[in-house]
Image (cartoon, helix red, strand yellow):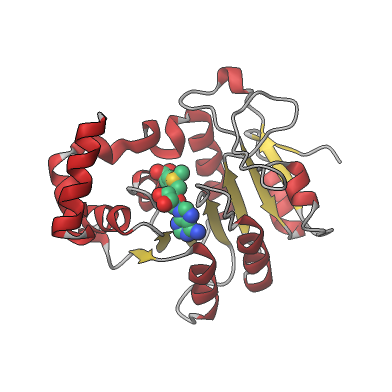
């Protein structure tokens, strides 16, 4: 997008406010509904991992942090379970809210910070607390919510599975996020959490064979039964310890 188009959008956004802007953007710019090249960054291998996880574990709910425009939320919404997603930027939240307006009884979108969102879900008795699949994708800058997100999830949910997007895959060339010292999404970041109960899995597929943006990921669990089920999936490989 040109600098002029960006400036015009910022003027319109200020004039009409984020709710109306999000709706207009959804209606007038349909190509923006497929941001990042499609769900899961346009990565066929990653979509397969998700389908495998959902098939083998039948999660009771799916939680996403970082809705953006709802492209991956839409992929999750095909599974007949409640979906919860949070977005910090109002114009993106309202874009997605309009997108899922007819599914709002099942696709629950929240405007806010992922850390307080997860705490709210943990305190909400209507939200399932067992066997929930979490997709953590709310990383955008040096204010990384990831450590707190993981801690909150494992403290409040039993048999949780966590997939983290944009994560370095050891020994492979997948792209990952690096926001500076102590804020790279890699194995050392997880090591610093100091947890001895966490099992890690990486994609079996090499980046060279993946489609789309070839962003890496890690899948985490802290339950022996879930670990066994994930170990049986050919799309994942357990991390070498
Ligand atoms: C990479 S995008 C998410 C893409 C989306 N999951 C998808 O697959 O289409 C990251 C999003 O997270 C949001 N974000 C960043 N920090 C956040 C936070 N602490 N809480 C909630 N959302 C956040 C950003 O505004 C951005 O829209």
Q: Quadrant of residue 171?
A: top right
Whether residue 65 is visible to the viewer of this picture, yes or no, is: no
Q: Where is residue 4 in the image (x, y as percent from the top left)?
A: 20, 33
Q: In which quarter of the image is residue 177?
A: top right
> In screen coordinates, is 129 left or right of 15?
right
> In screen coordinates, is 175 left or right of 107?
right
> In screen coordinates, is 19 left or right of 150?
left
Q: Position of residue 216 (x, y in %)?
A: 60, 34
Placement of 214 over or under 201, stated as above or below: above
Residue at image x 32%, y 57%?
A: 93
Residue at image x 38%, y 31%?
A: 37
Q: Residue placed farthest to the top in the image?
A: 208
Residue 147 vs residue 153, the one in the foreground: 147
Q: Quadrant of the N terminus?
A: top left
Q: Position of residue 49 (x, y in %)?
A: 56, 38
Residue at image x 65%, y 60%?
A: 150
């Amino acid at each position: 997008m040109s600098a002029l188009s960006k400036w015009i959008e910022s003027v319109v956004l200020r004039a009409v406010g984020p709710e109306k802007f999000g709706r207009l953007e959804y209606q007038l710019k349909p190509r923006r509904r497929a941001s990042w090249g499609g769900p899961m960054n346009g990565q066929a291998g990653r979509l397969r991992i998700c389908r495998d996880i959902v098939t083998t574990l039948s999660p009771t709910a799916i939680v996403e942090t970082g809705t953006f425009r709802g492209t991956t939320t839409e992929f999750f919404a095909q599974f007949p379970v409640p979906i919860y997603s949070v977005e910090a930027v109002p114009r993106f939240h309202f874009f997605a809210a309009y997108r899922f307006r007819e599914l709002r009884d099942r696709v629950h979108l929240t405007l806010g910070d992922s850390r307080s969102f997860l705490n709210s879900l943990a305190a909400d008795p209507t939200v399932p607390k067992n066997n929930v699949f979490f997709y953590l994708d709310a990383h955008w800058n040096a204010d990384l919510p990831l450590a707190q997100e993981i801690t909150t999830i494992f403290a409040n949910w039993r048999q949780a599975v966590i997939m983290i997007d944009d994560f370095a895959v050891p020994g492979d060339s997948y792209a990952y996020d690096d926001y500076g010292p102590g804020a790279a999404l890699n194995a050392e970041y997880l090591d610093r959490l100091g947890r001895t109960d966490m099992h890690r899995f990486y994609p079996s597929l090499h980046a060279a064979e993946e489609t789309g943006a070839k962003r890496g990921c890690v899948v985490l669990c802290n339950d022996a039964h879930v670990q066994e089920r994930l170990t049986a999936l050919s799309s994942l490989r357990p991390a070498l310890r």
